[in-house]
Image (cartoon, grey):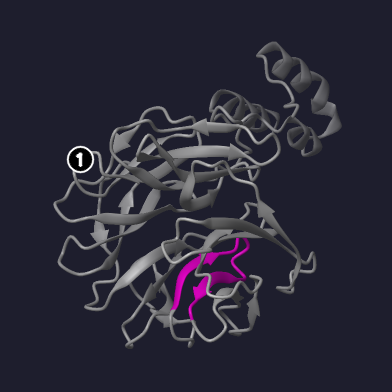
Amino acid sequence: MRISILVACLWLATSPLHAQIVFLSTRTGNWQIYRMDANGRNQTRLTRNEAGDYSPVWSPDGKQIAFESIRDGNWDIYVMDADGGNQRNLTQHPAIDSYPDWHPDGTRIAFNSNRDGTSHIYVIDTNGGNVKQITHLEFASSPKWSPDGKWIAFEWEGDLSGIYIIDPDTTHLCRISRTIPEAPMSVAGWSPDGKQIMYMAALDEARDNAIVVIATLSPDRNGKVVRWEQVRLPRSFKGSPAWGADGKSILFTGETRGNDDIYRYRLDSRKLRRLTDHPNNDGYPHEWHPPLRVSEKGLAPIPWGSIKSNLSSRNLPFLTFLFSSIGVKEEVE
């Protein structure tokens, strides 16, 4: 038992996890999918085709990426390995299927489709089977699973347009966004802890003037909002906001010298960092949330307090000496 604990702790200490960002870029002529480290380094192209690939999102374990593509002459949902290999068409339907998002357990993907004449939210198993329609509201799109898998946030462009969440099992529906007359809204996603939902509202027809709002949900998880807060974003902000893996930052597309780049904006310190710097356009970032908390440099420090709480007291003196000798320290914010 002691040996097993020691091996596990040594693995944690010597196997740092790196946050990864998947994004889109036109640097090769059309929109293709790339990945990079959380600090913007090691940018790598993942897809190569004459059509376009869009809306990439990580699987919960960081081993796969779902996306939409028109490479076969029709909009479908695709899945590939994190290195770009093993690309396959998941939906294979003549309708327009788009905006995929993984269930937290990794076995299902939500997406929107007009296969019954108008856009609705559907869920499909990752093997391509068991397709289920979730919404019955016209023009529902862009689903985002909650971290606990109990809700799906989405956009609705109906009589009461805005951002909503729905329980996929009971179809219980709650409105999340405040009313802004004639302002199209888009859902950015859930915070990593599931307590907040971020969305964007366009204040003019060209969508050049937009605001980002964070809605804080009631602690009892009943779908009610207790607070709305507008985020004060830098002037370079252009669109496609997304939560950072740390839950304390926002990734977004910003304009730099006439072209689009990807930025990280710290909500606490308001510090801005440009992650890409390319003469072509980069955008639509999505960061993988590693199982351990991620530092700003992309490393996952060891949660020493959690390790101590799960070990018996008779092992602590030896393990404390072991970790201190190899330089493992408790992270201080």
| Image quarter hosting the N terminus | top right
Q: Give percent across and percent down for residue 88.
A: 25, 59
Q: Give percent across and percent down for residue 132.
A: 43, 81
**Residue 69 position by quadrant:** bottom left
Residue found at x 40% / y 44%: 22
Viewer-nearest residue: 131 or 295 = 295
Give the residues in magenta.
140-157
Dot 1 falls on a residue whose secondary structure is: loop
> How many numbered circles does the render carry?
1
204 left or right of 32 in image: right
Would residue 104 be seen by someone viewing this image from the given angle?
A: no
Looking at the image, is 94 positioned above or below residue 311?
below
Q: Residue farthest to the right?
A: 313
| Image quarter hosting the C terminus | top right
> Residue 141 colored magenta?
yes
72 left or right of 330 in image: left
Viewer-nearest residue: 264 or 178 = 178
Viewer-nearest residue: 171 or 161 = 161
Q: Give percent across and percent down for residue 206.
A: 41, 62
